[in-house]
Image (cartoon, helix red, strand yellow):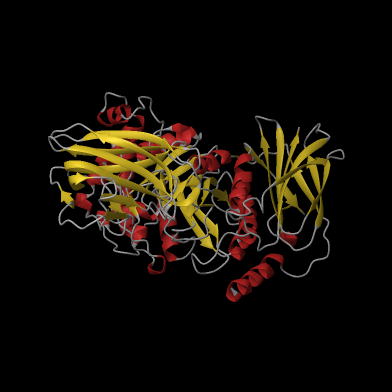
Amino acid sequence: MKKRFAILLLATAVVSGPSFSQQNHTLVVKAAQPTATIQPTMWGVFFEDINFGADGGIYAEMVKNRSFEFFKPLMGWTVNRKKFVEGEVLVVHDEERTNNPRHLRVTMNNTVKGDLGLTNEGFRGMGIKKGLRYDFSVMYKLARNAKTKLYIELADSTNQIIGDTTLYLTEGGLNWNKAAVSFHATATVPKGKLNIWFQGNGIVDLDMISLFPGDTWKNRPGGMRADMVQLLADMKPGFIRFPGGCIVEGFDLSNRYRWKNTVGPVEDRQLIMNRWNIEFPYRSAPDYFQTFGLGFFEYFQLAEDIGAEPLPILNCGMACQFNSAELVPMDEIDPYVQDALDLIEFANGDVNTQWGKVRAQMGHPAPFHLKMMGVGNENWGPQYIERLKVFMSAIKAKYPDFKLVCSSGTDPNGDRFDYLNGELRKLHADLIDEHYYRQPDWFLKNAKRYDNYPRNGSKIFGGEYASHVEKTVGTNRNCWLSAITEAAFMTGLERNADVVNMASYAPLFANVDGWQWAPDLIWVNNLQSYGTPDYYVQKLFSLNKGSKVVPITLNNEAVAGQDSLYASACIDSASNELIIKVVNASGVQQNNTLQLDGVKKLAAKGKLTTMKADLTAINSFDNPTNVVPVESAISLKGKQILLSSAPYSFNVIRVKM
């Protein structure tokens, strides 16, 4: 704790600099001189299945290891017996079911409730809500003449039953059948569990044992957690990037993400180990796998639901270069390229095409209108460039207007970055993906990063960024210091919207009981979710995006650090409003005059949205709105606004023209 406090003090000194007396500057906004068009995709979100973001997170399945395909087949399960009988519960491997070969075989002999059962612990427990409907389902095969009755129970941490029902399995024969039943919970608990008790005689095979809450997003069976999706929808993001990140590459190529394994019937999707299972020994997660219940169809559907452009990222034939550094020989790259072409067909193809038909069979005959795709994630070196060229050639030949996002490696500078940036610009790459996980002072010092970038040619995607208050990943949570320095940097991104077309914070979600990486934008437990101060900064930029950048200057220079001020301005053509964003990153109040030039008439009042807090302030489950935007009115005097910006504040002004 002492170390954390010391680092925060150091960071505070970096932000505030020398001791200032109260400042009063005139910032000039030239509202009639647009300099750049802001793309609809300017501010988006980046989803990766890290920190139990998918299974155990936004994917609402409550049963862990529902198909017994984890490395340890009974991980997450406990067999409950009145007395031990050898072989009454077996894990069976069926070679004919190649994607999902394991299932559980239970033998009953005049078994009654209490003799034999199973308990599933869920993902760090099951969050159960009083009065909510829960949907249980199971796939089963019943031997001829067998009779089976299941007692389904929800229990709290003291084994008190807080919801129960019964389910009869009646269909015998050689084929798999599905049975389902719904019931309601009688109490709210954060760490519940599921019990299944057997009654009957004979042999029953069980697989895909599942439990979903009834309040999923859009009430879709087998869907997503509504509270988590709502936080994304509230941001109105311009795009959603998926499925990662590093999981696209995999620890090695056998562990890479393969989108074709994530579509079609859920029970046919092949589970793999999540590479974050083993990435950080100090945050080991041996129960972290990818069931792909949240697959590419669901990602596309989510993007459509929240009005965001989908941005899938595909493996380029290279595994993570920090781990195995495996790569596919160039004469074996064709299947990877074909996966990319097939994905475009899956998203956009007619229902009579091979992959368009798969999409239609999943319930979406209309196309998803995919316009862009990423090739590789944080890959680097000549090996990446030679593989990228093959992808570019094949995709552009068939889809000339399709946009490709290309990797500039892991860091925003250095030899690797310089090499990739140079090569990608020679190739006229559509979008170059730059990543910056840095300490707060980096974001302040780089608010002018794109001021001198080429205005023509390749555009920038700020694909992953976050201000890390401490040097060590995963040792802190998001505080106002990280958020306000990101806000300062983002004014520079917005000011250079003719260069920067897209940007997204990363990572997006983190389960408080199962994270591997911090800081993160949104934190969740089994019942709750909340946005960090960084979330609200991202949301304010997204909701106040505008359509045209206009200059805002201090002494005829961009406002990017003078007396710890950072600012950007834009016009929202749809609402005919002027939007001004001002960050005061100093420890003193600043009374600044905003001079609005080039407008004939302005409303007498505007809307002011302010975020301010102590630099160490955080949001939490107990106080999720500790640091949030506050709205008020602000008056205009002619064509001037007096903005009294509090110490360490982010201010957004909207004025009707």
**Percent x, y for residue 627?**
66, 53
Of 356 and 1, which appears nearest the observer?
A: 1
**Percent x, y for residue 442?**
59, 63
Of 193 and 302, which appears nearest the observer?
A: 193
Tell me where residue 335 sits by quadrant: top left
Q: Is residue 334 left or right of residue 9?
A: left
Q: In this view, does 360 lie to the left or right of 232?
A: left
**Percent x, y for residue 282?**
41, 69
In the rendered image, the vertical position of residue 452 relative to residue 349, given as above or below? below
Q: What quarter of the picture does the C terminus occupy?
A: top right
Task: Tell me, yes or no, if residue 149 can be seen here.
Answer: yes
Q: Is residue 538 left or right of residue 128?
A: right
Tell me where residue 639 sits by quadrant: top right
In the rendered image, the vertical position of residue 449 relative to residue 226, given as above or below? below
Of 454 and 247, which appears nearest the observer?
A: 247
Q: In this view, does 479 lie to the left or right of 514?
A: right
Of 507 and 403, which appears nearest the observer?
A: 507
Q: What quarter of the picture does the N terminus occupy?
A: bottom right
Task: Tell me, yes or no, if residue 393 can be seen here.
Answer: no
**Percent x, y for residue 421?**
44, 56
Q: How many marks?
A: 0
